[in-house]
Image: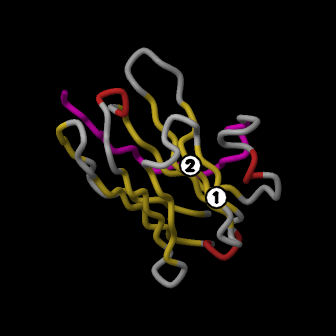
Amino acid sequence: QVQLVESEGGSVQAGGSLRLSCAAFGYTYSISCMAWFRQAPGKEREGVAVIDSDGRTRYADSVKGRFTISQDNVKNTLYLHMNSLKPEDTAMYYCAASMNPACLMAVVDIPEQWMYSYWGQGTQVTVSS
């Protein structure tokens, strides 16, 4: 089992920055990928970014060049650095973990969220114009 605990999100004005973190506990050695998803009111949950155990990353087109996903393997912590935030980035953000070997392509390329078995509690990010 893996438990994921996210940091608090926050509220910023457009153009601002935020960093989210997600600490993983339990059988973290078996994790193949960790990812960030988000869900805005009235919309489906969508993949934002993913990083695998080799450090390879994938990003949604909407956040490329603005968001950076990273991980600290010593602290078992996942991060999402968000810059140049826009009002359309407002959403509940979730971190997730997968042990599936195909997980890298399952977040933004061929969305298969079912591969992600472990989810954080979610944290709200609000960007005002």
Observer-nearest of 95 and 117: 95
Q: Position of residue 109 (x, y in %)?
A: 73, 39
Q: Position of residue 44 (x, y in %)?
A: 53, 22
Classify mark 1: residues with Cα within 10 Å, few (<14), some (14-19) or many (20+): some
SS for callout 2: strand
Residue 126 horizontal side relative to residue 112, left or right: left
Residue at 32%, 31% (x, y): give it: 90
Residue 103 horizontal side relative to residue 50, left or right: right
Magenta region: which residues?
112-129
- Give the image quarter of residue 88: top left
Residue beneath disc 1: 57
Please, what is the three-letter code of the amino acid marked with disc 2? Answer: Ala
Residue at 37%, 36% (x, y): give it: 92
Q: Quadrant of the N terminus?
A: bottom right
- Give the image quarter of residue 54: bottom right
Residue beneath disc 2: 49
Q: Quadrant of the C terminus?
A: top left
Residue at 31%, 41% (x, y): give it: 85
Is the residue 115 above or below the residue 128 in the image? below
Classify mark 2: residues with Cα within 10 Å, few (<14), some (14-19) or many (20+): many
Q: Is 114 a magenta residue?
A: yes
Q: How is the image coloured?
A: secondary structure
